[in-house]
Amino acid sequence: MADPLKIVSPIDGKIIAEREPTSVEQIRKALQCAITAQSSWCEKPVSERAVYCRKAIDWMLANADELGREIALQMGRPIQYAAGEIRGLHERGQAMIDIAEQSLETLVLAEKPGFNRFIRREPLGLVFTIAPWNYPYLTAVNSIIPALMAGNAVLLKHSVQTMLCAERFSQGFQQAGLPEGLFQHLHLDHHNTGILLKQKELDFVTFTGSVAGGSMVENALAGSFKSSALELGGKDPAYVREDADVSYAVENLVDGAFFNSGQSCCAVERIYVDQHIFKDFVDLYIAQVKQYQLGDPLDPATTLGPLVNTAAVQRVKTQIDQAVSLGAQSCIDDADFSNSDGLYFAPQVLLNVDHSMEVMSEESFGPVIGIMAVNNDEEALHYMNDSPYGLTASIWTRDETKAIEMGAKLQTGTVFMNRCDYLDPALAWVGVKNSGRGCALSSLGYEQLTRPKSFHLKCVE
């Protein structure tokens, strides 16, 4: 018998939940149940699917405080922010439901005498969503609601760290009266995840996680001709131009780097600042970072919680130590956060950094930021593109024309001006290079969850 799956809270190391992993026999049963349910679900009009999906996310919003507390217990986000993820889920889910009612309409072509021509978008069938722990609801809803709205059935495998979130999704759909089998969660270990990925009944896989995890998914699907969408993280840069509002940029870039303890795929992980405003920017930035309150995430006063596990701490610590050994200057003293210990890792700001240091080239996924001075836009572009990742990039300026001009040259999926670390559901969420492939959100997100079917009808008298 396989070992039970356990949620170990980063707050105090206590086990807060245990679940038996889903067996191979249970996987087979779930697949058959999903296929049966999807065969009739796909015949329902989009407007009827929307009723079920709205009820589910409305239930989750009504229980936001309870679900937020569970987020804090499972992955350590401060409770004052945790319920905000449920409000974000509701907003994003509503937007994707609204978008579906237009995106899934039949495309009727221009009139051609003697012919009737149109294109329908049909569901793929069965979608398997593999969701991470860092934003357990927001990352999952990106595929769950669109997949159901498109007429598919969904299987959800959540990170072991946030298994309770998968159960809450199921509870929400049960409360909505969604037909049995259309949405199911499976508590899977790595071995049985691999087995499920190889099942012929799957039609599409969406994965959010590490590059190594994405590689595992691709290897498992090799030769099956199944489609997948992979979001694999980033090393997202920000550039503060000389004409930027420095105070505004500092406020947002501190939050963009350290919210959720930096454990976000689209967190700002490196900052380039025009040399003429560099000192003013850095002084304000360091002062604001020191305002964080590191501590127990269940304390309403806490603004910075623990990292998720010891591996995360070691990754960040190794990057900081390597950078300092190569000449970087650390700007936060241990005395500034006297309660820093174990998973409770103090934020760090590094100066005198360069791209020979991992902190400026490899994903940190933690509370550390490197800040470099640059001479001009061209130098900033060079450094911003000098990365194996390409998820988002932000430009801080009053000149929109210049932001668009630079954005056209950035190797990234999203270009921000004067904001960062945000997903607008009306815009496509994509990555380039090692940040992944595929497209979530917006009307374009429905294209990967459906297949086009062309009708070419000739009328014969």
Image (tube, rainbow, N blue to C red):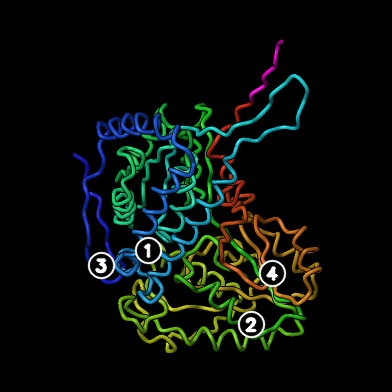
Residue farthest along the left direction in this orientation? 1
Residue farthest along the front direction in this orientation? 461
Closer to the eye: label 3 or 1: 1
Mark 1 and 4 residues: CB-CB less than 8 Å, in contact? no
**Element class at badge 2:** helix
Please state the extent of the stretch shown in magenta in the rendering.
Answer: 455-461
**Element class at badge 3:** loop
Which class describes the residues within 10 Å of circle 3: few (<14), some (14-19), or many (20+)? few
| Separation of marks 2 and 3 at Cα, in angstroms | 38 Å
| The magenta stretch spans residue 292 | no
- Residue under label 3, please give it: 13
Mark 1 and 2 residues: CB-CB less than 8 Å, in contact? no
Which amino acid, by three-letter code, is at mark 4?
A: Met
Label disc, if present, on residue 417 of the rendered structure: 4
- Residue under label 1, please give it: 61
Q: Nearer the viewer, residue 438 or 445?
A: 445
| Separation of marks 4 and 3 at Cα, in angstroms | 40 Å
Residue 353 on image: x %, y %:
63, 73
